[in-house]
Amino acid sequence: MTAAIDPNPNSYARHDLYEERETPLAGIGAFATVAIPSGTRIFCEESFVMLPETAAHLDLHRAVAALPDDKRAEFWALAASSKPSKDVAWVATLRACCDDDASGAFNILVEEYERAWSIFETNRFTCKSLDAAEPSMLGLFPRAARLNHSCAPNVFHRYNPLIRRLTVHALRDIAAGEELLTSYIDICHPTVTRRQLLRHWGFRCCCTACDSPDEEEDSRRKRMEGLFNQVINRERKRVRNEANWTAKDYERSLGVVMKAMGVLEQGGMEETDTLGVICVFGTQLAGKAGRGWEEEAVEWAKRAMEIDRKCLGEDSKEYMRAAELLEAATRQKDLAKL
Ligand SMILES: C[S@@+](CC[C@H](N)C(=O)[O-])C[C@H]1O[C@@H](n2cnc3c(N)ncnc32)[C@H](O)[C@@H]1O
């Protein structure tokens, strides 16, 4: 089953659902101007700078210099909060390219390169290619760059390589006036780990999850991290050792999947990097486990499809894959191959 892809790129842009404005403590943010129902594609946009993960200061500066004037101005207006890189080899390379390095002009130039790098590090999004074997790229998206972070986000972002755009979807119903908040990191970590990861962006998160007085909030994420790792490790083991994997082994894996789903649902963490992935594993394992698990396979495939539709849209490869899984689970055929 494949979803129709809109050939008109302009129809991807939505300007009617939110506005950008200053927040009291987190610079500029994006705020809903109307009620936004769960699953709405709030906006979707092309990158204006896209570089390989291995790119460095000089590559970035070259890419920015090549932008048209309005885009270049947009780049320099973005927030710059990341700390300078420890890598300084590029300074010597830059010096070698400059005619006159005796004056203060060179220092000013270095500062400009450092600011560009800080803007890039503060605002870039990982863009995975269609082919999982291809290395990821890092992209800048001017609208998404204004989304602030929360560890209990109400929107979900993901680069969609099929339409070559970053999409932003509502994870739940959002009221007019609410700030749109995405998560810069995997939300299935305990607070102490999330704080470390968020140091990259130079702020201390005070979201409802980080500042929750409820200790259960943190222990749920610790449990989730452990269960998610268990599911992944058991899957790796199964793939290496599929011929010897017994019905008992499948049942054990499915037990961990069900526990993980329970914890995620309890915590309202219904997004595709967590619950969506778990539902796909559940469907595949139930399909391979065979007798007695058929109905679960269908239910989990439906859940995966729902979550991928909500977080990514019907034009995503994840949604299309979940639809294929549902079809196979419903027909009780070919599931073992997926
Ligand atoms: C991608 S930008 C987001 C937009 C930014 N606020 C702006 O003014 O353009 C990331 C930066 O926003 C700020 N920021 C994002 N989320 C925040 C939060 N929850 N609390 C405080 N600052 C935050 C940090 O300075 C961070 O490095």
Image (cartoon, rainbow, N blue to C red):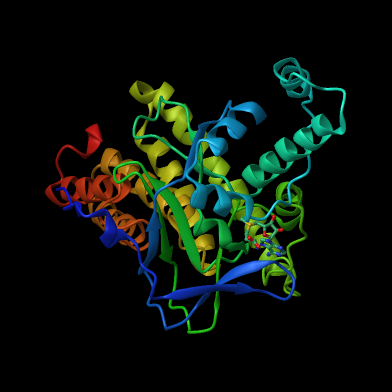
Residue at x-position 25% and y-position 56%: 314
Query: Horizontal and vertical percent for residue 330?
Result: 16, 52
Question: Does residue 297 appear to the left or right of 77 in the view shown?
Answer: left
Nearest to the observer: residue 42 or residue 133: 42
Query: Horizontal and vertical percent for residue 25?
Result: 74, 71
Image quadrant for the C terminus? top left
Q: Quick check: can you spot residue 258? A: no
On screen, residue 197 above or below 62: below
Residue at x-position 77% and y-position 26%: 87
On screen, residue 326 above or below 58: below
Nearest to the observer: residue 302 or residue 240: 302
Q: Quick check: can you spot residue 164? A: yes
Question: Does residue 293 appear to the left or right of 87 in the view shown?
Answer: left
Question: Does residue 85 appear to the left or right of 133 in the view shown?
Answer: right
On screen, residue 248 above or below 228: above
Nearest to the observer: residue 241 or residue 179: 179
Query: Horizontal and vertical percent for residue 60?
Result: 59, 33
Query: Horizontal and vertical percent for residue 165?
Result: 37, 49
Residue at x-position 22% and y-position 39%: 335
Nearest to the observer: residue 228 or residue 257: 228
